[in-house]
Amino acid sequence: QPLLVEFGGGWVQPGGSLKLSCAGNRFNLDVWAIGWFRQAPGKEREGLSCISSSGGYTNFADSVKGRFTISRDNAKNTVWLQMNDLEPNDTAVYYCAAAPYDRLCTIEPENNKYWGQGTQVTVSS
């Protein structure tokens, strides 16, 4: 079973919002930086946002800056990605991943060690 599990995907109309959750599956997230990524059919995996293990540092790709926010609660062993003002080109499978960073984080897919199985997000009218 995967060490990270994503929840919250689904269908939404353009302009709508979704909140994705990433939970540790018998895996403590509190010492790991967590990132969110997505992959649309025929496209490379794209880094969207990340948050350091303490939550004190975050980073966002230009494509989602101002629309997406990231947060975490280590007591709940969960990281969230709030997605607002969604557009059809946001349609993709969304993944969370864990990277061995302390004070920073990374949205480079190759620097993340453990991955969830993904959750589908579809934005259409």
Image (cartoon, rainbow, N blue to C red):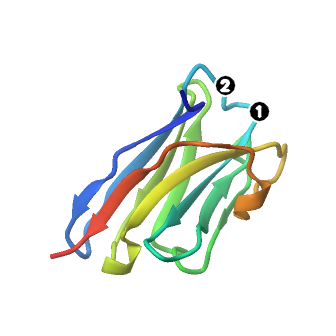
Report the side of 32 relative to 1 (left or right): right
Residue found at x 34% / y 46%: 8
Query: Mark 2: which amino acid?
Result: Asn
**Horizontal and vertical percent for residue 40?**
45, 71
Above-or-below relation of 46 to 79: below
Few, some or many C-alpha atoms within 10 Å of disc 1 (few <14, some 14-19, many ≥20)?
Answer: some
Q: Quadrant of the N terminus?
A: top right
Residue found at the far left of this picture: 125
Mark 1, residue position: 31
**Horizontal and vertical percent for residue 13?**
20, 70
Report the side of 1 relative to 41 (left or right): right
Query: Mark 1: which amino acid?
Result: Val
Q: Name which quarter of the figure residue 36 lies in.
A: bottom right
Q: Secondary structure at mark 2?
A: loop
**Horizontal and vertical percent for residue 35?**
64, 53
From the viewer's side, name the closer residue of 8 and 113.
113
Residue found at x 29% / y 65%: 122
> What is the number of the mark on residue 28?
2
From the viewer's side, name the closer residue of 31 and 90.
90
Report the side of 73 relative to 34 (left or right): left
Q: Name which quarter of the figure residue 49 lies in.
A: bottom right
**Horizontal and vertical percent for residue 91?**
36, 70
Q: Secondary structure at mark 1?
A: loop
Q: Name which quarter of the figure residue 70 lies in.
A: bottom right
Above-or-below relation of 14 to 80: below
Q: Are marks 1 and 2 in contact (CB under 8 Å)?
A: yes
